[in-house]
Image (cartoon, rainbow, N blue to C red):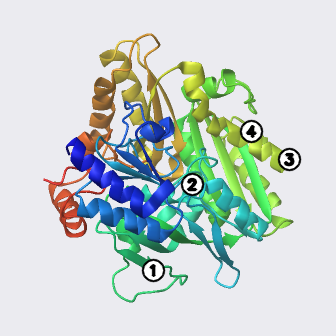
Amino acid sequence: MNIATHEAFLHALKSTLGSAVLAGEEIPIRNEQDWSALSSVRPLAVVRPTTPEAVAAAMRLCHAHRVAVVPQGGLTGLAGGARPIEDAVAISMERFTGIEEIDDDSSTITVRAGTPLEVVQQAADDAGFFFALDLGSRGSCTIGGNLGTNAGGNRVLRYGMMRELVLGLEVVLPDGTLVTSLNKMLKNNAGYDLKQLFIGSEGTLGIVTRIVLRLHPKPKSTMAAMVALDSYEHVLSLLASVRGNLGPLLSAFEVMWRDYWDVATGQVPGVRNPVPGDHPFTVLVEAQGNDAEGDPSRFYDTLKMAVESGFITDATIARSLSDVKDFWQTRDAAAEFKQVLGPHLSFDIGLPVAAMDRFALECRAALLRDVDGCRSYYYGHIADGNMHIIANVPAPVQQPADQINKVIYDLVKKHGGTISAEHGIGLTKKAYLGLTRSAEELAVMRLIKHALDPAGLLNPGKVFDMD
């Protein structure tokens, strides 16, 4: 696009949307990058709409002028999905925030896409409900971004991914058409379930503006324990035991390998070690229920049986919700690893549960062998098949991303896993998508993209190439 065309387009954009449009030096630095390690890019303009109609108007203008669009939420993504591209417009939902309605009878909450996750959680809590999605970046990530990546987080084991929490949505298509389908019903089989196209599509098929979310009853009991184990076999035995004895009460089963645990509790400020000692594995077990008197006894008896069976080496049980919060800090500590380790790469993979320790052993050894000085740290939501990896080469060496990616993703393929469990593909994983998706699956994805966005204007180059 030449300068004259730029100016004509920006004039049309500002004439239509006024002060919602920022261009040139007006563009904040924050809109030039997300949390990925990719370099920053200044877009042609940033549009900060406050209504669905404004989003649609911006998209119609971009479509008419054949200008690419990159949707942006809280910019907390790690895969580069919200990173802008040159000569494109970033449509930021940062001002389109707020809770529109809480329907007690339907147990739903209707929210605007730019609303931070923590705000949604608090609104549900204030209304006597529980919104189940929870991530370490809860204060910064937005609900639209959570939908775009089909976020998982800490309690997928009980409540499912974001996909299970969305009942209806409103979306702007690449040509500017506003499609409103704010369904509140759990059962609605009237034709295609269109919302599923946009959940997990990373802003490549439409820009979500409003969302109807499913709420659950607020738990009357929350129990947690930190337990130490001496083998992965015992981790699996413990998982089978707590699943069988706690059933739907089990809300989280977070496993931390020793390398992760030592950094989280030994180097991250403010994180205490609830189970001191040198243990190969530490597991956070959490259960939530509606029987405030009976649930704690059931939880305690389940752990007691695991101790008697020899699965558990040591354990600490939370005595208060403050203790539960402290336990979770050991998992949320991953967000602070950059402060203590320096620059690093974060990975979000899925694996068969039984293969996770074999993968970790092979991956740790391969990184040390093939990437000079590379250390790696393993943890995750193991019960739902999701492992996280942090890999870094100590400064001042720049992180050799291509080498590290190849080692990890080749092993993911070997073990029959997926390169992305909940963070999305974006730009950083696009080259590896074929390792875990077949040619036929990729062809269907391209067919859908061509049908909804034939000009390839919406978040172009993300997830996969159109041709």
- Reply above or below: 356 against 59: above
Mark whose residue sits in front, 2 or 3: 3
Residue 204 placed where, x, y %? 32, 58
What x and y, as percent, mark residue 99?
Answer: 65, 68
Give how far across and how far down residue 276 sits, in percent.
74, 26
Left or right of 351 in this view: 284 = right
Q: Earlier in the sequence, mark 2 or mark 3?
A: 2
Q: CA distance from mark 4 to mark 2?
A: 18 Å
Q: Which-is-in-front pick, marks 4 and 3? A: 3
User: Which quadrant of the view contains residue 66?
Assistant: bottom left
Taking the view exactly as shown, the residue that stands out farthest to the top is: 396
| Sequence-first disc among 4 and 2 | 2
**Alpha-carbon neighbours of circle 2 within 10 Å: few (<14), some, or many (≥20)?**
few
Q: Nearer the viewer, residue 101 or 455?
A: 455
Residue visible at 75% across and 28% down in the picture: 270
Callout 4 crowding tier (Cα within 10 Å): few <14, some 14–19, many ≥20: many
Q: Which residue is mark 1?
A: 181
Quarter-of-image position of residue 283: top right
Q: CA distance from mark 2 to mark 1?
A: 40 Å
Mark 2 to mark 3: distance in Å? Answer: 24 Å
Name the residue that disc number 3 marks.
Answer: 319
Residue denoted by label 2: 240
Residue wearing tag 4? 315
